[in-house]
């Protein structure tokens, strides 16, 4: 239970890490005596990140000060169900008279989880046509999706992550060493319905999506074939995308970069204004996963090379709605380069 407690003096980064580890979308904010002061959700954290992009900000100014809860002597199952349904809560704390947490009631404790329409119908698109130059010399022999990560190829890890959350309509776009990928996928014994689409020529990071026109439902998830995620709930991203009526949603990680030197700021006459010692900067970094509405595909020309950055510019010029879904930096890893690939091998072995 205490893994869901967080002190009001903690930072946004601390809260993101706790939410990622807990598997729940909400934390209980407490004082030093572990008395409950309020709650903070993943949505609260996302809004704060998008507003100022500062991982070091304290949560004391952003958590909800008037949370929903029950006192231990004043609740029953009917009241619990009504509160869950009315406010769409992830959890409800039960407090003693001093406001210390006695227990936590979770949604899944009360309602049997059903597969949502999102999970049943949403198409997953895995872009697997690139040459994988960052993984040379292995990709001289195998296409990047078939590079083994411990006991199975990278693309199997990706498909498994979607299958484990109920997403089974898998579409794979191939080009480089397509015959090898086709052979592997044709023998792939899984629950998913897997379709292969082959580009005639290399078409960049998203040019091959023209092959899916009239073949996907309203919204679909697009991922590069070198992105592995941990504890990332795809349905939450879909719901975010639909809630704000976005045409394209980028999944982005708030990443902290440190300059290991003193940075000089100078005046116009080249004299020193001030020096910042080892400054830190926060950036939202696109991880290579997106949710798209199928109408975006009308902006992709048939059999024409196109990268995601140019598609985004094209959509912005057409006034399409584009959103950003921020995630914890530890929720993903890019295995398309040797450094992160080796980290992923070590993690998986644990």
Image (cartoon, rainbow, N blue to C red):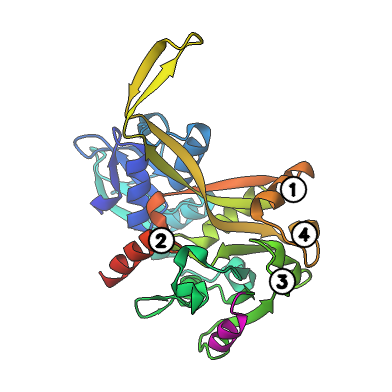
**Labels 3, 4: front one:** 3
Q: Which mark is residue 315?
A: 1
The mark that comes first in sequence, 4 or 1, is: 4
Q: Nearer the viewer, residue 338 or 193?
A: 338
Q: Residue at x 26, y 39 (%)?
A: 99
Percent x, y for residue 17? 34, 49
The mark that comes first in sequence, 2 or 4, is: 2
Percent x, y for residue 43? 49, 45
Count neighbours of disc 1 (C-alpha within 10 A) and say few if under 14, some if 14 to 19, many if 20 or more.
Answer: some
Quadrant of the drawing holding the N terminus = bottom left
Above or below, 247 relative to 176 = above
User: What kind of element bears circle 3?
Assistant: loop
Reading the image, the residue beneath label 2 is: 231
**Labels 2, 1: front one:** 1
Count neighbours of disc 2 (C-alpha within 10 A) and say few if under 14, some if 14 to 19, many if 20 or more.
Answer: some
Reading the image, the residue beneath label 3 is: 201
Reading the image, the residue beneath label 4 is: 300
Q: Nearer the viewer, residue 264 or 154?
A: 264
């Amino acid at each position: 239970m205490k893994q869901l407690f967080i002190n009001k003096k903690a930072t946004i980064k601390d809260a993101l890490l706790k939410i990622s580890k807990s598997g729940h979308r909400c934390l209980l904010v407490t004082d030093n005596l572990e008395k409950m002061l309020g709650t903070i959700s993943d949505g609260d954290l996302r809004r704060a990140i998008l507003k100022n992009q500062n991982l070091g900000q304290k949560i004391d100014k952003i958590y909800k000060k008037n949370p929903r809860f029950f006192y231990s002597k004043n609740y029953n199952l009917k009241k619990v169900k009504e509160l869950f349904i009315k406010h769409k809560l992830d959890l409800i704390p039960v407090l003693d008279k001093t406001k210390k947490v006695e227990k936590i009631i979770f949604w899944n404790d009360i309602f049997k989880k059903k597969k949502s329409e999102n999970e049943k119908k949403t198409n997953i698109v895995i872009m697997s046509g690139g040459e994988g130059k960052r993984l040379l010399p292995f990709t001289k022999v195998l296409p990047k999706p078939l590079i083994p990560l411990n006991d199975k190829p990278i693309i199997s890890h990706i498909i498994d992550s979607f299958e484990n959350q109920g997403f089974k309509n898998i579409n794979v776009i191939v080009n480089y060493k397509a015959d090898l990928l086709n052979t592997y996928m044709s023998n792939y014994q899984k629950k998913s319905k897997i379709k292969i689409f082959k580009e005639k020529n290399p078409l960049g990071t998203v040019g091959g999506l023209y092959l899916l026109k009239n073949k996907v439902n309203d919204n679909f998830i697009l991922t590069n074939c070198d992105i592995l995620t941990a504890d990332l709930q795809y349905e939450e991203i879909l719901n975010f995308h639909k809630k704000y009526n976005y045409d394209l949603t980028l999944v982005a990680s708030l990443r902290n970069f440190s300059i290991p030197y003193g940075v000089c700021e100078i005046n116009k006459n080249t004299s020193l204004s001030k020096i910042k010692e080892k400054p830190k900067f926060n950036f939202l970094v696109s991880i290579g996963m997106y949710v798209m509405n199928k109408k975006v595909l009308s902006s992709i020309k048939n059999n024409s090379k196109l990268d995601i950055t140019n598609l985004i510019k094209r959509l912005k010029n057409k006034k399409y709605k584009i959103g950003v879904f921020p995630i914890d930096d530890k929720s993903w890893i890019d295995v398309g380069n040797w450094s992160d690939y080796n980290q992923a091998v070590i993690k998986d072995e644990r």
